[in-house]
Image (cartoon, rainbow, N blue to C red):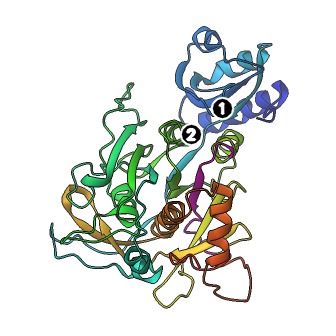
Amino acid sequence: MKKIMSILVIALLLIATVSVVFASGKQPDRVRVFIEFKGKPDTNVVNENNGVLLHRYDILDNVLAVELPVNALDGVLRNPNVVGVEFDAEVSISGRNGGGNTQPQPAQTLPWGVDRVDAELASAAGVTGLGVTVCVIDTGVDKDHQDLQANIAGGRNFVAKGATVDQSKWDDDNGHGTHVAGTIAAVDNTIGVVGVAHHASLLAAKVLNRRGSGYLSDVIAGIDYCVSSGADVVSMSLGTSSDVQAMHNAVDSAYASGVLLVAAAGNDYGGAVSYPAAYDSVVAVSATANDDSLASFSSVGPEVELAAPGVSILSTWNDGYYNTISGTSMATPHVSSVAALAMQANPLLTNVEVRALLQNTADDLGVAGRDNYFGYGLVDAELQ
């Protein structure tokens, strides 16, 4: 991680922070930060400054995520073993509510997005994601959903409730993560929907709360879990406007380990592509409507790599239900699951080679060649 703040810079920042807080009538208290060390992280720095250790990471072996009193930051930076301190940032889902729940267990239908990326043609050829693991970093997944249960391999919670984190509580309390999971791997049975890669295995990393928001420090912990659990693809239907170096380093490290990372470009048309999608090591996904036009909400920019269906997408929802919603959140799992199909069909390819395959086989939309709206084009499960 680059050195984020000098002692002088953080002192000035603290003055500004305290001034704003007092002006609003609130007392400054505690903040979430990343601490970078010269070598192995020293937890004594946390304990000595009345801090709370939030996360230590395998993919960031010299970084701790902690919560500290605001007035302890200056002292932490003066520690000779500390290279720098960086503030944690909030992150949220990239989905938009677009419809109501249907009753549990309706007759199975093929969602238009799954059809549009030609997943049913890949399935007919025996390519269904079998043997590939996709890790969904989101609000959790409904572990008992009748259209997902057979493909769920496990999960872990990283969201604190009060002062504690119960890692077993990764069941979805929002619906968004379950919706993403259904587009990836809803079972091909007689009910509900069918996913793009309906034989892929699912892992759930719950990093966002019931309101669909959370912290990058928890997202990094989710990535760490996905990598250590053997995920082949990491799907992140979330984003933030904050460019945090710890997050940048985490996705770079995961990508270097052989994992393919896919993330939502964001729902701010005319605005910049959000992070982590904007990082080079992550596939940024924009959203399309059913006429192949760009979704009216989709963020655009040079970082956009692929496009996928993201308007009025029907998929699984909490408590065995189904829901139709829109967003680049909904486009992202189409790409994540087509990547799973590519990995099953081409098991000797690296994540870098799979990424190139998705680029080369995408259906070009818009102007010829790569552009800021659709990237290389609409992802295509036929892969040829």
Is 260 part of what is drawn in magenta? yes
Which residue is label 2 attached to?
220
258 vs 265, nearest the viewer: 258
Residue 223 at x, y percent in the picture: 54, 42
Is 193 part of what is drawn in magenta? no
Which residue is label 1 attached to?
60
Span shown in magenta? 256-269
Snapshot quadrant of residue 206: top left
Left or right: 153, with 320 as reference point: right
Residue depicted at 55% across the width and 57% down the height:
347
Left or right: 45, with 93 as reference point: right
Snapshot quadrant of residue 145: bottom left
Above or below for 177 versus 252: below
Kind of residue indicated by mark 1: Leu
Callout 1: SS: loop
Left or right: 326, with 178 as reference point: right
Residue 82 at x, y percent in the picture: 76, 19
